[in-house]
Image (cartoon, coloured by chain):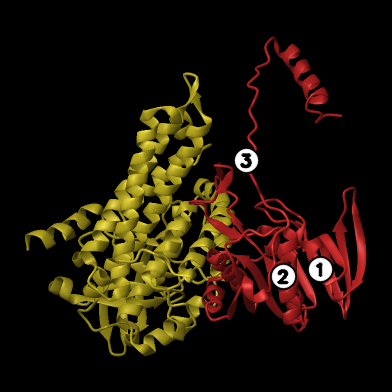
Chain colours: A yellow, B red
Amino acid sequence: MDFSLTDEQRQMQALARQFARDVIKPAAARHDEDESYPADVIEQASGLGLLNTGVPEEYGGLGLGMLSEVLIGEELAWGCMGIYTILMASELGITPILLAGTDEQQARFLPGLVQGPALAAFALSEPDNGSDAAALRTRAVIEGEEIVLNGSKMWITNGGLADLTVVFATADPEAGSRGVVAVVVEKDTPGFSHVKITGKMGQRASYTAELNFDNVRVPVSNMLGAVGDGFRIAMRTLDKTRIPVAAGSVGIARRALDESIAYARERSAFGRKIHDFQAIQFKLADMRIGIDTARLATHHAAWLVDQGAPHGVESAIAKTHASDLAFDAANEAIQIHGGYGYVNEYPVEKLLRDAKLNQIYEGTNEIQRIVIARGLIR
Amino acid sequence: MKIAVVIKQVPDVEARIRAEDGKVSLDGVSFILDGMDEYGVEEALRLREGGLECDISVLALGPARVQDAIRTALAMGADEATHIVTDDQLDALAQAKVFADVVRMQGAELVLLGGKQADWDSAALGAALAEELGWPLSDWTTSLELEGRALTLRHDTDQGTERLEMPLPAVVTTQQGLNEPRYPTLPNIMKAKRKPVELLSLAELGSVSSLTRIADEAIETRDRRNEILSGDAATVAKELVDRLRNEARVLA
């Protein structure tokens, strides 16, 4: 067993750490407060090659593996989970194209995503169904050489901003999960519109939208796989992309620990620094235990992906454990900060608000536990 | 022409350093390319981007871990590197001898390096290297222009700045303000893997030894006095101003 990183991975990690420290962290509070999209940060990230890292080399990208992606993800999320979500969701949007796109489709869709700050998006959830993805209602009707889309998608990160959106729709509502198609919809396609969702509790820098499809026509050549493949494409995508959610969660937890250590070192009570109290020390130790175990689970799941090995259960374990841990760590960080932790003068209340979403998106932690349990009682 | 950039790997600014048994312990410390040396790499890249035809060669001395700093410099855009591998700590004069040999061997005509090294805070290497090579030196340089083979530089002095003119070959050490170093991009990090790094042992460069030996190291700690001024606001303010003026001497 070898836990060491390559020189190159250490360099990437160092770059991401520096970028998080110098660029993301200073911008985080403002975009959280304004609920505004950090276009300048994303542009800089794109310039450094941190955006759409999964695009293969033959299409002008870097073709990074999952382990490299999660090493970078942890660092960026340390700076701001909401900002990292923009990048993470773009990798999510690319993944179905990588998994199920033909060479022709990849050559058509991917190069444009690495020539500037272009985003991709993944549109599965709908206003009336999320975890029950097979129940989706957006209709896809094939008319000759075109697919006509009608319906709505909900909670779509980068929705409306993305150059490419992979939309999951049903070609046959009677067929349940076997009637689903995956279709690439380009940004300015007529009939495709979006509404930004505001009032989010956390991750307010990321742009979340409801997408509406009103007789949106795309060529049949934009369909990934065949009619009926869509559900499996979506599930295989999420089996992979839950791992960066785990990595982001580790980043949040690490930030919670860093902020807690810094505060506990400065703050005094009863004539001593509060880090002298075992009650505080145990909280710090528990955070560290959580961070290390969650990181190991995350790296293991990522390693399985890079080996081409099955990873569905491991990615579910990593995502669930890491996001629960991140929430707990942020919660304890607030407790350590006392009253100051409850106001936005310190960054820890934001960590809690941000971490909450990691327990929900890309498959709620309840769905993850179902995935894990199914493997046990089969 | 060839530009040599001498770099050093130093503890991360956020590292917590301890001294144990009269020696600084670097266990568990993460290391980075010295920020002052990043200015040197960046300035070389800017000269090339400004139209100068040149190869940029990175020179570093130290243990195997120094590879990481070398890769950073290559990922910023330097072309090649030479790593003189040693676990020995050499003083500035000994380092200057080693680097001077490599600079001459490679035929470099401009040497860029940090104005000081962030680890032991020594600012001697640039001057020692210029002396060893017999080349002119601009230290603490805040701007550099190259016209043909003529350098025009501005550098800091204790009381102000000077404009210097000198011909190549020359040694230039950096100062904050010289430029804003770029990040190594991910694509360049991946390309850096394929750039050549030559490994040399210290023995191959002939025998060098330090004239000074660090016999004991301690880390400066400043105890706070924990004095709290008492009295009404006006009295405390007056006392504070008095102390700032006469004790701390931060007010005129």
- Please tell me which residue lies in front, A2 or A181: A2
Amino acid under label 3?
Ala
In the rendered image, the vertical position of residue B7 relative to residue A331, given as above or below: below
- Relative side of B238 to B120, left or right: right
Which quadrant of the structure image shows residue B75?
bottom right
Q: Which residue is mark 1?
A: B132
CA separation in Å, label 1 and label 2? 9 Å
> In this view, which residue lies farthest toward the top?
B231
Q: Position of residue B54 (x, y in %)?
A: 74, 82
- Relative side of B38 to A365, left or right: right
Tag 2 or tag 1, which sits nearer the N-term? 2
Circles 1 and 2, Cβ within 8 Å, touching? The answer is yes
Please report, as a chain letter, where disc 3 is located. Answer: B
For the point 47% across and 77% down, which residue is it?
Answer: A62
How many residues crowd mark 3 within 10 Å: few (<14), some (14–19), many (20+)?
Answer: few
Q: Quadrant of the C terminus of chain B?
A: top right
